[in-house]
Image (cartoon, rainbow, N blue to C red):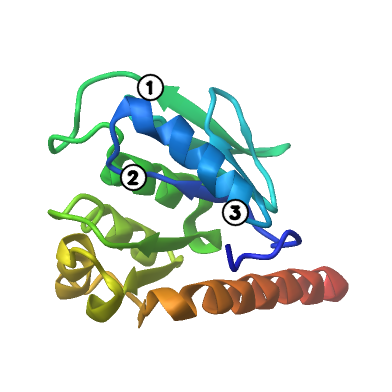
């Protein structure tokens, strides 16, 4: 709810939830958030001020094209016991966005996403993890931190403001770069 409606980047959420719950969660979040929140559908555009939630029975990948980012949904087999898998998602983010990506790994059991967030870091993207004190379950962030794949650890209460500052800084760098050219 702390992300403003004019947030300058699109948000994609991959969470281990049953298929029957993701649409309900997206609707609830849409009601309490300033940005648009909805369950992702094949080909949805990743737009500033919009959050897309991965359906509970599909892997979500992203594609960065001439017209911006979009969502690719695949109903294949679970990866590491998960569908959607954070590893599948983060790998596509690393490949498609590289240094332009910001990834956050938050509360959750196990280590899904812990390796693939490292691919985003190696590609030059910014990687964040939720801190132990604000996690319900510190498994996924802990695994990513222990593997050295996290640039900064933030509390849940600090996360929105930090993301707002990062997106604003990145937008300014793009504008400054455009002026230089």
- Residue tagged 3: 32
Please, what secondary structure does the residue beneath circle 3 have? helix
Quadrant location, the C terminus: bottom right
In space, the residues marked 3 and 2 are separated at their CA atoms by: 18 Å
Q: Earlier in the sequence, mark 1 or mark 2?
A: 2
Q: Is residue 10 visible?
A: yes
Mark 2 nearby-residue class (10 Å; few <14, some 14–19, many ≥20)? some
Q: Nearer the viewer, residue 96 or 141?
A: 141
Residue displayed at 46% across by 34% down? 24
Mark 3 nearby-residue class (10 Å; few <14, some 14–19, many ≥20)? few
- Residue tagged 1: 74
Please give the label number shown on residue 86: none
In space, the residues marked 1 and 3 are separated at their CA atoms by: 29 Å
Q: Quadrant of residue 37?
A: top right
- Residue tagged 2: 15
Q: Which percent across, then down, holds residue 89?
A: 37, 42
């Amino acid at each position: 709810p702390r992300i403003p409606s004019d947030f300058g980047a699109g948000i994609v959420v991959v969470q281990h939830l049953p298929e029957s719950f993701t649409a309900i969660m997206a609707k609830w979040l849409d009601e309490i958030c300033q940005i648009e929140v909805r369950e992702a559908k094949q080909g949805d555009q990743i737009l500033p001020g919009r959050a897309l939630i991965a359906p509970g029975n599909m892997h979500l990948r992203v594609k960065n094209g001439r017209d911006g980012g979009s969502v690719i949904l695949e109903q294949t087999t679970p990866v590491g016991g998960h569908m959607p898998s954070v590893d599948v998602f983060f790998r596509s983010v690393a490949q498609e966005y590289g240094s332009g990506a910001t990834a956050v790994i938050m509360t959750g059991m196990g280590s899904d996403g812990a390796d693939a967030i490292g691919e985003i870091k190696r590609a030059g993207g910014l990687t964040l993890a939720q801190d132990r004190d604000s996690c319900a379950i510190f498994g996924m962030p802990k695994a990513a931190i222990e593997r050295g794949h996290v640039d900064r650890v933030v509390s849940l209460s600090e996360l929105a403001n930090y993301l707002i500052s990062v997106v604003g800084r990145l937008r300014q760098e793009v504008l400054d770069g455009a002026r230089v050219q």
